[in-house]
Amino acid sequence: MPTARTSSTRRRVGLVLPPPASLIGQGWTFWIFAVTGFGWVFVGRFVPGTEGRDFAALQSRVCRSSSSTGEDGNE
């Protein structure tokens, strides 16, 4: 018996997948969804969160990380 989460996911895929698949084909639709999914995972894993931080703290973190590579961006 499928769980509520599985049913919800199936319902969403059923609503979102057919329109692009009918326009550009199943292969291209798969790759678009795969790249988008990889992008979400990448952002969730590697992009730092900024919630609750003020601008000065973020700026100091960026300046600190860019100064380690040198002025021209090369090490």
Image (spheres, rainbow, N blue to C red):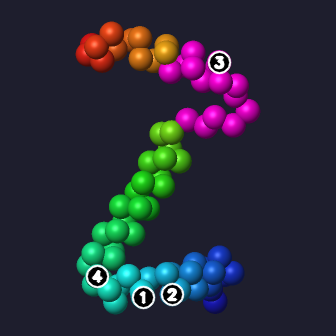
- The percent position of residue 17, horizontal first and vertical second, equals 44, 83
Q: CA distance from mark 4 to mark 2?
A: 17 Å
* Residue type beneath disc 3: Ala
Q: Which residue is mark 2?
A: 14
User: Which quarter of the rendering shows the C terminus?
Assistant: top left
Secondary-structure class at tag 4? helix
* Residue type beneath disc 2: Gly
Could you tell which of marks 4 and 1 lies nearer the N-terminus? 1
Q: Which residue is mark 1?
A: 18
Does residue 10 appear anywhere in the picture? Answer: no
Q: CA distance from mark 1 to mark 2?
A: 7 Å
In the image, taking residue 47 as reference, residue 32 lies left or right, namely: left
Could you tell which of marks 3 and 2 lies nearer the N-terminus? 2
Q: Which circle, 1 or 3, is nearer the viewer?
A: 3
* Residue type beneath disc 4: Ile
Q: CA distance from mark 4 to mark 1?
A: 10 Å
| Depicted 9 relative to depicted 52: above or below | below
Residue extent of the magenta highlight: 48-62
Disc 4 packing (10 Å; few <14; some 14–19; many ≥20) = few
- The percent position of residue 59, horizontal first and vertical second, equals 57, 20
- The percent position of residue 18, horizontal first and vertical second, equals 42, 88
| Depicted 51 relative to depicted 32: above or below | above
Q: Which residue is mark 4?
A: 24
Could you tell which of marks 1 and 3 lies nearer the N-terminus? 1
User: Are dots 1 and 2 in contact, CB under 8 Å?
Assistant: yes
* Residue type beneath disc 1: Pro
> What residue is drawn where x is 42% and y is 54%?
39
| Depicted 32 relative to depicted 64: above or below | below
Q: Which circle, 1 or 2, is nearer the viewer?
A: 1
